[in-house]
Image (cartoon, helix red, strand yellow):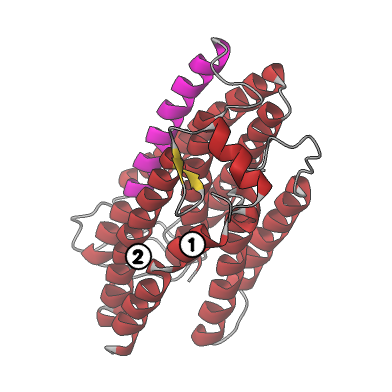
Amino acid sequence: MSSHTPAIQENMMVHDSTYEPGIQVYHMKLGMWVFLLSEVMFFTSLIGTYIILRFAHPDHFAAPGEVLNVPLTAFNTFFLICSSVTMVKAFAAIQKGDQKGLKLWLLATIVIGACFVGIQAIEYVALVHEGFVPAAAEYHALGRTGVEGGAVLGGPLYGATFYTMTGFHGAHVSIGVICLVFVLIRAMRGHYTHSDHRGVELIGLYWHFVDLVWIILFTIVYLI
Amino acid sequence: MTTETQTHDEHHDPPYMLIFLVLLVVTLAEVGYAFLPLAKFWLAFGLCVMAIWKAVLVALYYMHLRSEPRSLWILVAVPMPLVVILIAAVITEF
């Protein structure tokens, strides 16, 4: 105990039953970080699979913008980055004891997160309508960058990897939105205070991680 | 910043809006860069550098990793070599 800094000693007194002395964070936060790190490996395996398939079968994949709608997805990326700002603002608000700010920023995060999922659903509907489905043997695109309709722009691996990667990410965002709704309900009931707002911090970590993963996926799937 | 340190009143927020602007500008730069007439290698290299830069900014400032204890940094660093090994392994297979 005596080897800890005053801040850590104070925290140990405040969160006596939940404090993890070895790692110097409370148990739930340690658990969330371990979970997120397992998610890193999960998404890395998906990205690794995508890379190996793309190197092995380059004829199955189209150039950026030929099939996928890059401007729409760039706009969606902007949405997700905005939601990270609103989430961190919610966290900053409750750190200062600002209950109203917490609720408003949480609500904004939920709305923007739901918009992200909605735009992704619109993108899926449009792509499926054009025939870009996971099982398609050949994808004859209408063409977005001057490619004439009827040209073969990819094989089945393109759709399979695209929907797997973006679908899993979309599921994570959807789960995050649902969790945020629960956190907002708890916030409206006054469960979070200036001194104890662990729930807000934990969902914030998850939400920013989802944003971080999308930053990587957007680059790899849409731009490269 | 975190629950460990929030008990102190002298609290300073990280530059959240500045980070947001940087993320926004780099995202726009990425989209523009992706359509430049460059060799595929340099396109992929530049885009990966920008994406990793953005991811690091999110982790450091929005996930507050910058102000976390060193022990948590070690925990976070553990799977990173595995990530690099996995990606390097699949790339070098061809």
| Res. A65 visible in picture | no
Q: Nearer the viewer, residue A195 or A19?
A: A19
Give the answer, above or below, for where A85 lies relative to B91.
above
Q: Nearer the viewer, residue A93 or B45?
A: A93
Residue at 42% in and 70% down: B80
State the SS at label 1: helix
Location of residue A98 (image quadrant) = top right
- The reply to whether discs 2 and 1 touch (Cβ–Cβ < 8 Å) is no
Residue at 58% in and 49% down: B63
What amino acid type should be assigned to the residue bearing mark 1? Ile
* Residue labelled with disc 2: A44
Location of residue A14 (image quadrant) = top right
Asked if residue A111 lies left or right of residue A47, the reply is: right
Query: Where in the figure is residue A109, as x and y percent of width and height?
Result: 58, 31
| Span of residues in magenta | A167-188
* Residue labelled with disc 1: A216
Mark 1, other Cα within 10 Å: few <14 / some 14–19 / many ≥20: many
Q: Main secondary structure of the magenta part?
A: helix
Query: Where in the figure is residue A117, as x and y percent of width and height?
Result: 45, 36
In the rendered image, residues at marks 2 and 1 fall on the same chain: yes
The chain ID associated with circle 2 is A
Location of residue A136 (image quadrant) = bottom left
